[in-house]
Amino acid sequence: MARPLRIEYPGAFYHVINRGNAGEAIFKSVRDREKFLEYLQTASERFAVRIHTYCLMTNHYHLLVETPQANLGQAVKWVNVSLMNN
């Protein structure tokens, strides 16, 4: 069952978490982490979101994101799809 849609509004702060399927690693090398950070930077510019802090673990990540516009879902979806296609 999918989780309910997140309520989005301008000026909100969100704690975003994403985990690998069945606890699998999503970052397998230093280059994977570097590429992910490049995706975050691009998403920040493209969707005008502010990444205040992040934590990259082997099988998941945490982000603290501020959204001046109500567009968190678009930004996170773009990052996750980019990560999967890497």
Image (spheres, grey):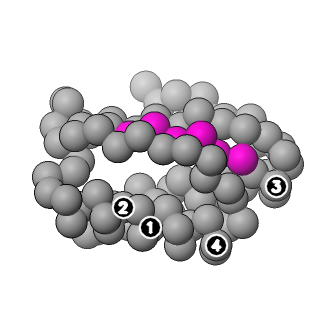
Residue placed under numbered mark 4 in the picture: 45
Q: In which quarter of the image is the C terminus?
A: bottom left
Q: Where is residue 20 in the image (x, y as percent from the top left)?
A: 26, 39
| Mark 3 crowd level (few <14, some 14–19, many ≥20, 10 Å Cα) | some
| Mark 4 crowd level (few <14, some 14–19, many ≥20, 10 Å Cα) | few
Q: What residue type is labelled 4?
A: Glu
**SS at circle 1:** helix
Residue drawn at x 52%, y 28% is 3
Residue placed under numbered mark 1 in the picture: 39
Question: Is 61 on the left or on the right of 72, as rendered?
Answer: left
Q: Residue 68 carries which label?
A: 3
Residue drawn at x 23%, y 48% is 26
Q: Was residue 25 drawn as part of the magenta stretch in this picture?
A: no
Question: Is 33 on the left or on the right of 49, as rendered?
Answer: left
Mark 4–mark 2 contact, CB under 8 Å? no
Label total for image: 4
Residue drawn at x 35%, y 43% is 56
Q: Was residue 65 drawn as part of the magenta stretch in this picture?
A: yes
Which comes sooner in the sequence, label 3 or label 1?
1
Viewer-closest of 32 and 52: 52
Which comes sooner in the sequence, label 4 or label 2?
2
Q: What residue type is labelled 1?
A: Tyr
Q: In which quarter of the image is the N terminus?
A: top left
Q: In this view, does 62 lie above or below 65?
A: above
- Distance in Å between CA atoms under marks 2 and 1: 5 Å
> What is the magenta range?
61-66
- Distance in Å between CA atoms under marks 3 and 1: 19 Å
